[in-house]
Image (cartoon, rainbow, N blue to C red):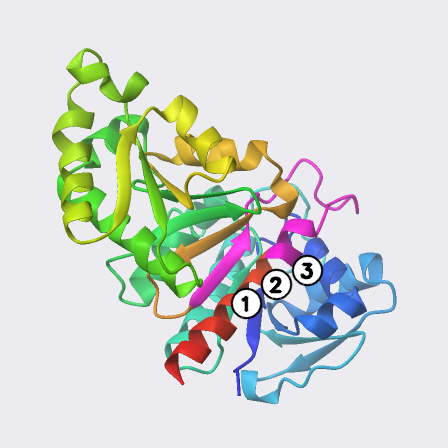
Amino acid sequence: LMKPIVVTFGDAAGIGPEIVVKTFADTEFMEQYPAFVVGDLGIMKSAAARWGSSLVVEPIFAPEEYAPAARRMQVVSLSGLPADLQHGEISAAAGAAAFGAIRQSIEWANDGRVSAICTAPIHKEALAAAGVPYPGHTEMLADLSGTSDYGMMLANPHLRTLLVTVHCSILDAVRKLSVERELQVIRLAHRSLQSMGIAQPRIAVAGLNPHAGEGGLFGSEDMELIAPAVAQARQEGIDAVGPLPGDTVFMQARKGRFDIVVAQYHDQGLIPVKLLGVEDGVNVTVGLPFVRTSPDHGTAFDIAGQGIADPSSLKTALATAHQLARSSSAATI
């Protein structure tokens, strides 16, 4: 029997609580993809009163107490946030509460008490204001689960991309590239897609420089760091090609030539996925000992509290968490 899935409530000053209650208020959807919430009970109750159309919020105290029920949202409450928390403003209290929910979820996942974590968006500046030593979810999840071989995959129905470097400056991203890191991410792409049911994944590796370096005319990184890693991966029986020019590789993948693109830095990989539509995009942290997904958008402070946030990406993330948890629990049986 699959353990329950937990949804974190995100940064309470952003759209997290709103998209969570809108998701849970969709009875048909929740029947298919049940979950419980970890966060602040008061915040979730007031969000449900505003946007949850007759959704009942009930406190529970442990994952084992969760029992799916129509029009019910069960919440393990951790923090006591002020009821008058301002939407759209950076708050150390909201940052600390968001981190508390994530840390608790990781603990449950490490102990095998939940089968997957689906996270609502958090705010990096609020985390920093709270003194949290991580720039984002990916780094927290890796550190608190003791994982060194991990990556950030963004996917929608048309395209999947896995990043070699994540939250750092472009300058640092280039400095962090190495044959070892490239090979690690290519292998990770291969293993992750196999665990998603693709037996022989076709992997494209994007070049760093324009035209993938144009034979060294536009920088030597592609020849010296990326090409040797691709060659090594091929020797290991992985179907990888590259480095391919970054301006055309995503288009080729979207047309079905590749199952995933390994991108060198954050924006190279995320712009094409988000351009194709944020509403059906999902972020999956691969390489962890448990399943973790999230929407591919942020806290949207500019529209927080207005009732106009779209829960589509969170729904996709929750549905994906269920699918991945099912396939990984089937694999371990």
Q: Nearer the viewer, mark 1 or mark 3?
A: 1
**Quadrant position of residue 198:** bottom left
Where residue 329 sits: x, y (%)?
45, 78
Q: For the residue marked with disc 1, what is the amino acid?
A: Gln
Instruction: State the extent of the magenta-drawn residues as a range.
Output: 291-316
Mark sitting earlier along the chain (3/2): 3
Q: Is residue 171 left or right of residue 99?
A: left
- Asked whether the residues under the numbered discs 1 and 3 touch, taking CB atoms below 8 Å apart as contact, a structural biologist would say no
- Asked whether the residues under the numbered discs 1 and 2 touch, taking CB atoms below 8 Å apart as contact, a structural biologist would say yes
Residue placed most toward the observer, 128 or 251: 251
Residue 133 appears anywhere in the view = no
Residue 241 appears anywhere in the view = yes
Where residue 110 sits: x, y (%)?
37, 76
Magenta-drawn stretch, dominant element (helix, strand or loop): loop
Q: Is residue 101 magenta?
A: no
Inter-mark Cα distance, 3 to 2: 13 Å
Q: Is residue 8 left or right of residue 163?
A: right
Residue placed most toward the observer, 11 or 144: 144
Mark sitting earlier along the chain (1/3): 3
* In the image, residue 142 above or below residue 60: above
Which residue is tagged 3? 20
